[in-house]
Image: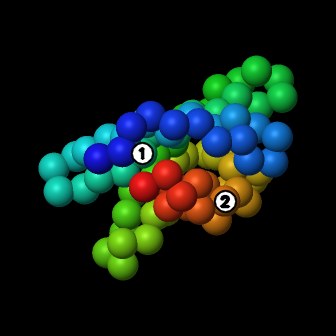
Amino acid sequence: MSTLFNKVINGQQFNFQPIEFGQQTGYHVDVKDDEGTRWEFRMFQDDDNEYRVDGEKLPDWITAASSELVSAINEHE
């Protein structure tokens, strides 16, 4: 599995850490907003091997960046 990496998307630095849960692989992702609040969520591959954002009560700006987050992972792998 890939190593830790960071990617700036829409002016925010997203930090990606690889994780594995049994057969499922993905990334733990964290990012700080403009007020300094750290948001944490996971990205896992679905049955079609597409990465999806998995988190509760995430702000719209994170979910809106999901395609850029997937692109960042694909570029890194």
Q: Does dot 2 land on a helix, a strand or a loop?
A: helix
Q: Does dot 1 land on a helix, a strand or a loop?
A: strand
Residue 31 lies left or right of residue 28; in this view the side is right
Q: Residue 4, how many percent across, how many down?
A: 44, 34
The amino acid at mark 1 is Tyr
Query: What residue is pinned by disc 2?
Result: 68
Q: Is residue 34 above or below residue 63?
A: above
Q: How many marks?
A: 2
Q: Is residue 39 above or below residue 23?
A: above
Residue at 16% over, 50% down: 22
Query: What residue is pinned by disc 1?
Result: 27
Q: Nearer the viewer, residue 66 or 9?
A: 9
In terms of image quadrants, where is residue 14?
top right
Residue 70 lies left or right of residue 77; in this view the side is right
Residue at 66% over, 59% down: 68
Circle 1 Cα neighbour tier, 10 Å, few/some/many (<14 / 14–19 / ≥20): many
The amino acid at mark 2 is Glu
Name the image colouring: rainbow
Residue 26 lies left or right of residue 52; in this view the side is left
Q: Is residue 71 above or below residue 11?
A: below
Q: Is residue 35 above or below residue 41?
A: above
Q: Residue 77, how many percent across, how many down?
A: 42, 55
Whether residue 53 is visible, yes or no, is no
